[in-house]
């Protein structure tokens, strides 16, 4: 009984107050106008309803990912930092809460939690992060090979006895409700 719809987050195709809860998980960082997107989420949630957000904390809070991004930047240049750094663009909790307030949402709860992202190997983590971004289309096979090789060393502190990578992943959770 799920009705899937596609729409622009800055102009959601739903009536005002259509939902009890709106959840935005690991996507806010990709929206060009985050305050507008949050305002739209607030518009489509009923009065007293909840907008729930989950975003990764800042890159400086992610030791394994920071190591990987530094490797990519070293081999692919500043564009790699820009492309891979997008994931961490909402990582300042105070700024995130400020965007909510600017969008007409009152933050009712906020927490920072640490989990673990697991990959079968350092190469698998590199593949997930590099191939899952536009960076893969902008680098040569030689640069990609150099990133993989260097990442094996940079990610060594996060490799388990079986060769898997356990990357700490810090994220922010925010619950907010419309103020109107």
Image: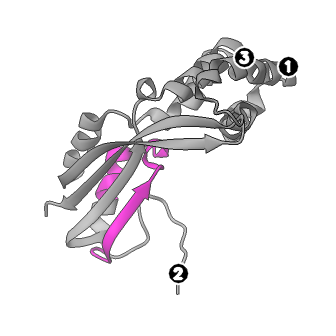
Badge nearest the viewer, 1 or 2:
1
> Mark 3 or mark 1, which has the lower sequence index?
1
- Residue for badge 2: 3
Q: Where is residue 155 shown, x and y percent of the image?
A: 63, 24
Quadrant assignment, res 9:
bottom left
- Residue for badge 3: 150
The secondary structure type at the circle numbered 2 is: loop
Q: Is residue 3 visible?
A: yes
| Quadrant housing the C terminus | bottom left
Q: Are marks 1 and 2 in contact (CB under 8 Å)?
A: no
Q: Tell me the crowding category of disc 3: few under 14, some 14 to 19, or many 20 or more residues within 10 angstroms, Cα based.
A: some
Q: Where is residue 11 shown, x and y percent of the image?
A: 41, 61
Residue 25 falls inside the magenta stretch: yes
* Above or below, comparing residue 3 to residue 68 in the picture: below
Colour scheme in the image? one colour
The secondary structure type at the circle numbered 3 is: helix
Q: Tell me the crowding category of disc 1: few under 14, some 14 to 19, or many 20 or more residues within 10 angstroms, Cα based.
A: few
> Mark 2 or mark 3, which has the lower sequence index?
2
The secondary structure type at the circle numbered 1 is: helix
- At a point 53% along the width and 23% down the height, the residue shown is 66
- Residue for badge 1: 142
- Pick the residue in front: 122 or 76: 122
Residue 45 placement, left or right of 135:
left
Badge nearest the viewer, 2 or 3:
3
Q: Where is residue 144 shown, x and y percent of the image?
A: 79, 24
Residue, far bottom: 1
- At a point 29% along the width and 41% down the height, the residue shown is 96
Badge nearest the viewer, 3 or 1:
3
- Look at the image and give the residue range highlighted in magenta: 16-40
Q: Is residue 10 visible?
A: no
- At a point 55% along the width and 35% down the height, the residue shown is 167
Residue, far left: 180
């Amino acid at each position: 009984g799920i009705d899937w719809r596609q729409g622009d987050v800055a102009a959601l195709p739903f009536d005002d107050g259509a939902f009890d809860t709106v959840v935005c998980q690991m996507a806010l960082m990709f929206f060009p106008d985050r305050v507008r997107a949050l305002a739209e989420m607030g518009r489509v949630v009923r009065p007293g309803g909840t907008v729930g957000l989950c975003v990764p904390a800042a890159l400086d809070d992610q030791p394994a990912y920071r190591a990987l991004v530094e490797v990519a930047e070293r081999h692919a240049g500043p564009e790699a930092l820009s492309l891979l750094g997008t994931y961490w663009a909402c990582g300042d909790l105070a700024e995130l809460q400020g965007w909510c307030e600017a969008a007409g949402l009152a933050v009712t709860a906020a927490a920072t939690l640490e989990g673990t992202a697991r990959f079968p190997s350092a190469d698998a983590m590199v593949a997930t992060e590099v191939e899952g971004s536009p960076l893969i289309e902008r680098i040569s096979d030689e640069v990609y090979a150099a990133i993989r090789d260097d990442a094996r060393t940079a990610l060594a502190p996060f490799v388990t006895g079986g060769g898997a990578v356990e990357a700490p992943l810090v994220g922010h959770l925010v619950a907010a409700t419309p103020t109107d």
